[in-house]
Every structure is written in C-alpha cells, then in structure tokens.
Amino acid sequence: MAQTFKEELVQRIVRNLLDIHILRLIQTKPMWGYMIIKRMKTLFGVKIRHSALYPLLNSLEERGFLRSEKQTERGRVRRVYEITSRGIQLIESYYDSLRDQLQLLDIKG
C-alpha cells in the first residue's frame, strides 16, 4: 500500500513539475526527445506525448535553461539538448525549496 502511495506521489510531482524533471534528466547527460520520453516512462512511470514534450523543450530553450544542437548519427538527424548554467540554477532552487518543505519551514511561518 505504501509503495502505491509513493508511486502515485512521484507521478503527481513529475507531472506538475515536468520542466524541472526534464532538466534533471538532461543534467545527467545530453539527450534528444525520444530518449527523454523513454527515460521519463522508465524512471517515473509518466508517459509524455511528443506534442507536449517539444513545445516544453522549445520553451526551456527560449528561457535559457537548455541549449540544443542538431547532430547526425548513422544518417539520422537529432536535436540534442544540454542543460545550461541557468538551468542548473533552477534545479538548485528546486532542491532548496524541497529542503525547506521537508524541514517544515514553509508552514512554521
């Protein structure tokens, strides 16, 4: 039962903070869209549609959290995304916020 709650909570967190979790994935290594979709499903049990992912990646890039470049491998062109220092700062802010919540600083007010 506890495992079910945990899985449900993880999926809710990931869906609501999808941009943060995509940045966290890309922070581990540069990735292309299909790889992101597969890793999100494997790690978090969250299925992302292409029609949702690519506008989000474009937005993250426009906001300076990611950069991308086209790469050709075995005749196939892929857009590979890499996190920027600004993206790393956003992730660090996310972690700081989580720490505050875990220490109940957000409700002790």
Image: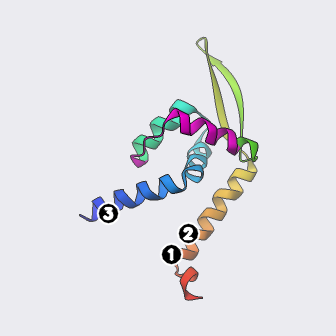
**Residue 26, located in which quarter of the rendered image?**
top right
Image quadrant holding the C terminus, namely bottom right
What label does residue 18 carry, if any? none
For residue 8, side relative to residue 27 (left or right): left
Residue under pointer 2: 98
Q: Secondary structure at mark 3?
A: helix
How crowded is the residue under tag 2: few (<14 C-alpha within 10 Å), some, or many (20+)?
Answer: some
Q: Is residue 100 above or below residue 31?
A: below
The structure residue drawn at horizontal position 55% and vertical position 55%, both measured from the top left corner, is: 17
Indicate which disc, 3 or 2, sits on the residue closer to the N terminus: 3
Residue under pointer 1: 102
Cβ–Cβ below 8 Å for labels 3 and 1?
A: no
Taking the view exactly as shown, the residue that stands out farthest to the bottom is 109
How crowded is the residue under tag 1: few (<14 C-alpha within 10 Å), some, or many (20+)?
Answer: few
Cβ–Cβ below 8 Å for labels 2 and 1?
A: yes
Give the alpha-carbon distance from disc 3 to disc 1, as whole Å. Answer: 18 Å
Q: Position of residue 71 (x, y in %)?
A: 67, 22
As shown in the figure, which amino acid type bears the numbered disc 3?
Phe
Q: Position of residue 52 (x, y in %)?
A: 55, 39
As shown in the figure, which amino acid type bears the numbered disc 1?
Leu
The structure residue drawn at horizontal position 61% and vertical position 63%, both measured from the top left corner, is: 94
Q: Position of residue 8 (x, y in %)?
A: 36, 58
Magenta span of residues: 44-60
Image quadrant holding the N terminus, namely bottom left
The reply to whether the magenta stretch includes residue 50 is yes
Q: Position of residue 107 (x, y in %)?
A: 54, 84
What label does residue 5 carry, if any? 3
For residue 38, side relative to residue 53 (left or right): left
How crowded is the residue under tag 3: few (<14 C-alpha within 10 Å), some, or many (20+)?
Answer: few
Task: Name the image colouring.
Answer: rainbow
Q: Nearer the viewer, mark 3 or mark 2?
A: 3
Give the alpha-carbon distance from disc 3 to disc 2, as whole Å. Answer: 19 Å
